[in-house]
Image (cartoon, rainbow, N blue to C red):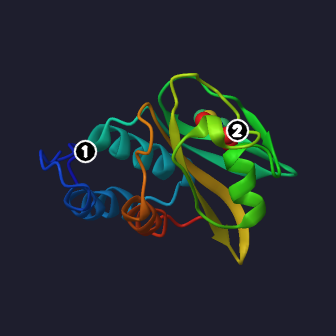
Amino acid sequence: MAEDLNITTSTNKAEQYRSLLPQIEALLTGEPDLIANLANVCAALKEQFKWFWVGFYLVKGNELVLGPFQGPVACTRIGLGRGVCGAAWQQEKTLIVPDVDAFPCHIACSSLSKSEIVLPFFNDGKVVGVLDVDSSELDEFDDTDAVYLQQIIELVNFK
Ligand code: SME
């Protein structure tokens, strides 16, 4: 496919995701390389939503290690249970944090990040990484984001 993204001007979040989903699916189709695919997912999400930071951390040994991302430089390694990312990994569930300053042990890669959503993803029943999205606005993320971001990561083959 052409590598141009069609950015919808709709201000409805669900509509934005619905416009993006088939385009991400097309971007991933036929490409087996995980890093290439994660990089394009980040770029597509960042381009549509203009969030402060969008990126992946991948489980390597007993740590999450920074993977493809869009946004300012970020911490490279996160231990199990540390920060929102490490907590989502440990608890094996999506975490929505409306105010990162109120989250115990939040890892502040940037003081500009105000709210966050982290989704773990799995291979053979084990967490193999997380998708982390940060906003410079408080209370940016809700169940709509959780549902559609989940659909997006399910398009990726993490094997
Ligand atoms: N804030 C995250 C760390 C990663 S950066 O936000 C990119 C956390 O608490 O896990």
Percent from the top left, x then y, of residue 83?
73, 43
Q: Amino acid at mark 1?
A: Glu
Q: Amino acid at mark 2?
A: His
Bin the neighbour count of mark 2 within 10 Å (Cα to Cα): few under 14, some 14-19, many 20 and up.
some
The response on whether ligand 1 sits within 8 Å of label 2 is yes
Q: Is residue 31 above or below residue 9?
A: below
Percent from the top left, x then y, of residue 34?
55, 54
Quarter of the image where the C terminus is located = bottom right
At 62% across and 27% down in the image, what residue appears?
74
Numbered-mark total = 2
Percent from the top left, x then y, of residue 113?
52, 30
Q: Is residue 70 visible to the viewer in this orientation of the structure?
A: yes
Give 131 or 4, whichever is nearer the viewer.
131
Give 74 or 135, whichever is nearer the viewer.
135
Can you name the residue that lies furthest to the left here? Answer: 9
Quarter of the image where the N terminus is located = bottom left
Can you name the residue that lies furthest to the right here? Answer: 62
At 48% across and 70% down in the image, what residue appears?
154
Bin the neighbour count of mark 1 within 10 Å (Cα to Cα): few under 14, some 14-19, many 20 and up.
few
Return the disc, 1 or 2, that comes first in the chain's sequence: 1
Can you name the residue that lies furthest to the bottom here? Answer: 124
Q: Which mark is residue 106?
A: 2
Q: Answer with left or right where residue 53 lies relative to residue 47.
A: right
Calculate the distance from the C-alpha at mark 1 to the C-alpha at mark 2: 35 Å
Residue 102 sits in quarter: top right
Residue designated by label 1:
3
Give 149 or 137, whichever is nearer the viewer.
137
- The quarter of the image that holds ligand 1 is top right
Percent from the top left, x then y, of residue 21?
29, 62
At 40% across and 45% down in the image, what residue appears?
140
Q: Answer with left or right where residue 23 lies relative to residue 116.
A: left
At 73% across and 41% down in the image, what residue appears?
65
